[in-house]
Amino acid sequence: MKINILGFLVVFTACVFSHAQQGQVSINQDKNISKLLEIKKDMNKNDSDRYKIQIYSGNRKEAEAAQNDFNKEFEDWPTIMQYETPNFKIWAGSFRTRLEADRALKKIKRQFPSAFIFKPKKSS
């Protein structure tokens, strides 16, 4: 009986003295960080200045299969499907330099031997 009363007292005391804490978080950051984030967004929008790797061109069903295979094997490089009459094309990556694209192509060609590097045409 003593143990049950002691246990009750411990639980009761813990409940009485525990309470929710409230606080306020303030973030102090350099005002230039917001500017840098905007610049990065603009750079990512202007994707036509970057190199891409085409891994497939053909019908839609096989393009989707190639895209799925690529995404499973190479998670670091995002893919997009483009339609240029009459073919669906799978493009991978967005590389700033030709050297970056060449290094990626070397790895990609092991599984996709017909892959090649290109720069998309600028849309006007």
Image (cartoon, rainbow, N blue to C red):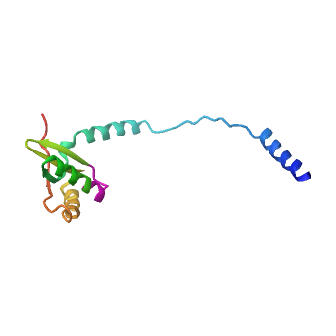
- Report the front residue among 98 and 59: 59
Q: Position of residue 71 (x, y in %)?
A: 28, 54
Q: Position of residue 34 (x, y in %)?
A: 39, 36
- Report the front residue among 114 and 77: 114
Residue 96 visible in the shown view: no
Q: Residue 1 vs residue 116: left or right?
A: right
- Report the front residue among 41 and 67: 67
Q: Residue at x 91, y 51 (%)?
A: 1
**Which residues make up the magenta segment?**
70-78
Hey, which quadrant is residue 46 in on the image?
Answer: top left
- Report the front residue among 15 and 26: 15
Please tell me whether residue 113 is drawn above or below residue 64 in the rendered image.
Answer: below
Quadrant for the C terminus in the image: top left
Please tell me whether residue 22 is drawn above or below residue 99 in the rendered image.
Answer: above
Hey, which quadrant is residue 123 in on the image?
Answer: top left
Q: Residue 74 vs residue 115: left or right?
A: right
Q: Residue at x 79, y 44 (%)?
A: 14
Q: Residue at x 31, y 55 (%)?
A: 75
Asked whether 100 falls inside the magenta stretch, the response is: no
Please tell me whether residue 41 is drawn above or below residue 58 in the rendered image.
Answer: above
